[in-house]
Image (cartoon, grey):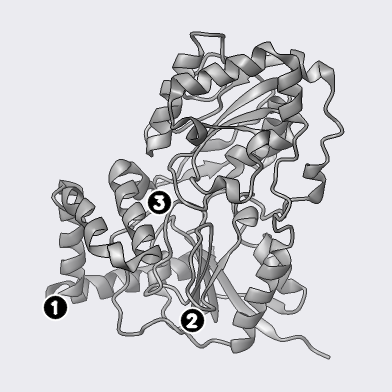
Amino acid sequence: MSRKILKIKFVDMPGEFNLQDNFILDILRERYEIVFSDQPDFLFYSVFGIEYLGYSDCVRIFMDGEPVLPNFNDCDYAIGYTYMTMGDRYHRAAGLLASSIGAEMPRRIMDRSAVTEQMAHRKFCNFIYSNATKGDGAKLRIEFCKKLMEYKAVDCPGSVLHNLDTDLLAKRYEGFDEGGCPIVSDNSWQDSKQSFLRNYKFTIAFENLRIPGMTTEKLINPFFAYSVPIYWGNPDVLREYNPKAFINCAEYGDDLHAVIRRVKELDRDDEQYLEMLRQPPLQPDYDFDQREKLREFLYKIMERGNHPVRNPEAVNCWEPISANLILRWGGNYQTVHNALNFAAANAEGLTDKLAELDTLYSSNSWKLVQRLRRFADSKWGYVPKKVFLFLLKIYRKLKSSL
């Protein structure tokens, strides 16, 4: 019996995402025959561009790999980190998204029998980052690392606070493309980073932003390397992760001095340190079947066929032009995100919460973006917008002919 054919395309994805060999395709290929097409029935897209706007006659599926909420006027379905509900149009798959290759969290991570006494006598702490400005956490982790260095040296092989040259870490980026997105050399840096972390008792693991539900590889990688994470980020992290297995800045009210006192305490007491290292990283009820649930979500979409459910009258969202731009807004974007999350969870507090956006609305960046949006929606912007979409089509044809 022949299998159903799916016409698929991926656009606006991060550099390390393999457009022709990835976990989404692995799942779909179990049931369907995949054909890559410039006239797709199903378009998967993320936040690294606006090419998706050129595809209207298809089902759009948004994949959230960055601190960006899905816009359901833009997409028909979404896969993300955030705890939210949107009927059958949204699926949370945080564990899969935390891995650049969509790897499911293995149950073996709960087995800590490999912990040895020698692990208490490794190097002190590491700090591996290339982002120094995008997001509140990016700035806070630099401040924390500098304070921790007053106690002991912290090895920083990344470009931020760089003080260590090493051949143990593979090169992640080869530079940047014309759109400002990093060009990934290969994925060997993931394995090399894991090996590097194994040499250290502690790893500074601060997210770029504090987003409810969004726990990335920054926390997960140290667990696999048996290095205690010093974590700042997801305020709901304890819903899935064991508080006894890592140092959570939120537990100390984000008092960096208090966090450092806890690090010192563990560093000076081998028994306490090893006890934390032996703790299973995840809560007992952690969902280890995220891949199977994502499979069910995707199959239901595919079986419905090319039938968009988004509002055809809605205007495409023009303000989040790229993830890089959003992250450059730093605290402004955090304010927007928190307000929207609050509104989704507590409609009664919407009026008071949205008042926090007054400062943002008066910023020059926001005014510029709103002007661009109003222009695009006006009769004067109609032609430029159509020209833009036409040029996108030409670009796609030229790209496919090369």
Which residue position holds label 1? 379
Name the secondary structure under disc 1.
Answer: helix
Asked if residue 256 shows in the view, the reply is yes
Q: Residue 274, located in which quarter of the rendered image?
A: top right
Tag shown at residue 58? 2
Question: Label 3 is placed on what type of residue?
Answer: Ala
Nearest the viewer among 102 and 215 is: 215
Give above or below for 137 relative to 80. above
* Local SS, label 2: loop
Could you tell me residue 308's position as x and y percent? Answer: 47, 84
Q: What is the quadrant of residue 170 in the picture?
A: top right
Amino acid at the residue labelled 2: Cys
Q: CA distance from mark 3 to mark 1?
A: 28 Å
Q: Quadrant of residue 296?
A: bottom right
Q: Residue drawn 63% across and 82% down? A: 300
Q: Residue furthest right?
A: 113
State the quadrant of the C terminus: bottom right
Mark 2 or 1, nearer chain start:
2
Amino acid type shown at disc 1: Lys
Tell me: 74 left or right of 266: left
